[in-house]
Amino acid sequence: MKIGIIQQHNTPDVVNNKKRLAAAIRSVAGNGAQLVVLQELHNSLYFCQEERVDLFDLAEPIPGPSTAFYGDLARELGVVIVTSLFERRAAGLYHNTAVVMERDGTIAGKYRKMHIPDDPAYYEKFYFTPGDLGFHPIDTSVGRLGVLVCWDQWYPEAARLMALQGAEILIYPTAIGYESTDTPEEQQRQREAWTTVQRGHAVANGLPVVAVNRVGYESDPSEVTGGIQFGGSSFVAGPRGELLVRASDTEESITVVEVDLHHSEQVRRWWPFLRDRRIDKSGEITRRLTDGILMG
C-alpha cells in the first residue's frame, strides 16, 4: 500500500491551511497514494498554547464542514484520508478527534484522543474531554487502521490494544515540538525519544507505524513561553522498527512511501511476541501503580 504523509507549517489563516492541504493531498494521490495521513489539528494553529474560551469557536460538529471538505477530496481522488479535528460534540463538550474518510467520501470511523496532556504550552485539558470510544481500529478499504493521536504515542498499552484487535498499521497524527529555550542537543534528544518509542510499538506489535507531525515555529499569544518550534520529522517505520522514510525537522514535506502490510505476518512468525505474552500474569497492568501489593 502506498501512503502519503503531509507535514505542514500552519498559519492563522484556516482557509489557506486547508487550501494548501488540499493541494498536497492531490499531489500525493497523483503519485499513487491510497492512504493519506495528516498532522494533528491540521486546520489551524496549535491553539492549546493558551487557555481562551473564545477558541472553542474553532470546534465543529462531526459530521460537519471539515468532514464534508475532506470527504469530497477523498471521493474525488479515490483515497482514504486520516484527518484530525477539534470536535464540538455538544455545548461545553469537546474532543480532539481523528476522523477517517473513506474513498467514497463517507466517514469510515473516528477515534477520540484518550490521553490528554496538560503541560506548559500544551494546555489540552482545558479544551479536550478524554475520549470515550476506547481503543478500536477502523476498518477501511485499504485495511484495518489503528488510529491514535499524539500523546497516545507514549503509551504502549494503546498500541497493543489496537494490535490485539487486528489493526494492520498504527497511525499517529501529531503536534509536538520544542520550547524556544531548548538547546539543539536537547531538541535532538526529544526528537529521538519521540521516534524511538513509536518504533518500539512497531517492533513489539509487528506492525508498521505512521507518525505525521506539524513543523515550523508558532508563537505563544499569551507570551508566557517563547512559543513552540514544531519538530516535523514525520516518519514511517516497518514492522521491525526500520525507518522507511523520515521527513525534515525544519521544512514542510509531502511524501509517498510504500508499505507491505503482508510483511507483518512474516515478522510475527520470526518474532512471536503475541504468542509468548504472559496474559495470566498481567492483571496489575490496569492499576495506576502496584504499590502496597505483595508480589509473590
Image (spheres, helix red, strand yellow):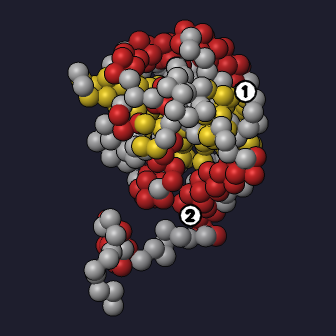
- Say what secondary structure mark 1 lies in: loop
In the rendered image, the residue lying farthest to the bottom is 296
Residue holding disc 1: 252
Q: Disc 2 designates what residue?
A: 204
The location of residue 256, given as percent across then percent down, is 72, 32
Residue type for callout 2 = Ala
**Residue at 62% over, 51% down:** 194
Q: Residue drawn 64% across and 70% down?
A: 270
Which element is circle 2 on? helix
Q: Vertically, is 28 above or below 203?
A: above
Classify the position of the C terminus by image quarter.
bottom left
Say above or below: 155 vs 86. Answer: below
Q: Residues within 10 Å of mark 2 (few under 14, many from 20)?
A: many
Nearest to N terminus: mark 2 or mark 1: 2
Q: Nearer the viewer, residue 90 or 1?
A: 90
Q: Residue furthest front?
A: 224
Q: Is residue 217 above or below residue 189?
A: above
Q: In the drawing, does residue 178 fall left or right of residue 274?
A: right
**Residue 171 place in picture, x, y as percent:** 54, 42
Task: Tell me: residue 112, above or below residue 189.
Answer: above
Question: What x and y, as percent, mark residue 63?
Answer: 35, 19
* Crowd around label 1: few <14 · some 14–19 · many ≥20 (10 Å): some
What residue do we see at 36% from left, 17% from top?
Answer: 54
In-image side of 191 versus 137 (left or right): right
Q: Position of residue 231 (x, y in %)?
A: 67, 38
Name the foreground residue: 159 vs 79: 159
Residue drawn at the location 70% of the way across and 40% of the way down: 233
Nearer to the camera, 179 or 4:
179
Residue 74 in sight: yes
Q: Which corner quadrant holds the N terminus? A: top right
The answer to whether residue 3 is visible is: no
Alpha-carbon span between mark 2 and mark 1: 30 Å
